[in-house]
Image (cartoon, rainbow, N blue to C red):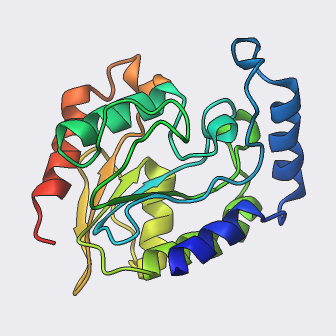
Amino acid sequence: MRMADLNTRISSCTACPRLVAWCRKVAVEKRKSYADDDYWGRPVPNFGDPDGDILIVGLAPAAHGANRTGRMFTGDRSGDWLFRALHRAGLASQAEATHAGDGLELSRVLITAVCHCAPPDNKPTRDEIKTCAGFLNETVSMRSWSTVICLGSLAWAETMKFYGVSPRPKFGYGSQHQIEDGPLIIGSYHPSQQNTFTGRLTEQMLDDVIELAASRPH
């Protein structure tokens, strides 16, 4: 019930006028290949197992991905990579995530984001990140996580901030930091096209991170 309440508050948030306007604009103008789709066009709630022990923190919804489908990492190539990896690790019921009603279910895993609205150029401002931090903090504090996977340096920084880690350990692929009496935090490059097309992140690299989290006691 706590997660359902949180997700309702996330999806109805209008705290950042620039992001509200952008999400709605994209939902009206649409991408030609999705012209017949009804876009979500508002903040995207958390997705996954509300009783899970693995938390995945992303950056923000993609304009024509989650902002279209209304579900984290669903409907874009970043999500294709992530859900294939989760499926191979036995944490997702299927490897594909095309729309919110496709039957995908996650086990042990909850997916959240630093910013729940799709930002222009995939770059939320510092004020927007600060405004959305309340939702991230509430999500992180809701469970005793065994592992937190941070997809990208911003997710790493905001997660460390929540746990009060200072000085902040350097982010990089495979970076790890154990929180005393808390989760193991693992860093990975985000499965964005910028990283996957260049080979900076390979499917094996993403598999290794997911499998490490899946192998930990819960």
Q: Residue furthest top?
A: 32
Between residue 148 and residue 130, name the one nearer to us: 148
| Position of 204 relative to 158 (above/below) | above
**What residue is rendered at 39% in x and 17% in y?**
198
Closer to us: 170 or 184: 184
Q: Does residue 20 appear left or right of residue 214 in this picture?
A: right
Q: Nearer the viewer, residue 172 or 118?
A: 118
Q: Position of residue 65 (x, y in %)?
A: 61, 33
Q: Is residue 196 above or below residue 182?
A: above
Q: Which residue does the image show at 81% across and 34% down from the upper left?
A: 27
Q: Residue at x 34, y 52 (%)?
A: 106
Q: How many marks?
A: 0
The location of residue 167, given as percent across then percent down, is: 39, 74
Image-based side of 67 in relation to 2, left or right: right
Measuring from the top left, give residue 73's x and y in whole percent.
Answer: 50, 40
- Image location (x, y in percent) of residue 154: 51, 54
Q: Residue at the far bottom: name it.
A: 181
Determine the image quadrant of residue 115: bottom right
45 up-or-down from 137: above or below:
above
Q: Is residue 130 visible?
A: no
213 to 72, vertically: above or below: below
> From the viewer's perspective, is 127 left or right of 139?
right
User: Is residue 179 shown to the viewer in this render?
Assistant: yes
Residue at image position (76%, 32%) is: 38
- Where residue 218 sits, quadrant-wise, is bottom left
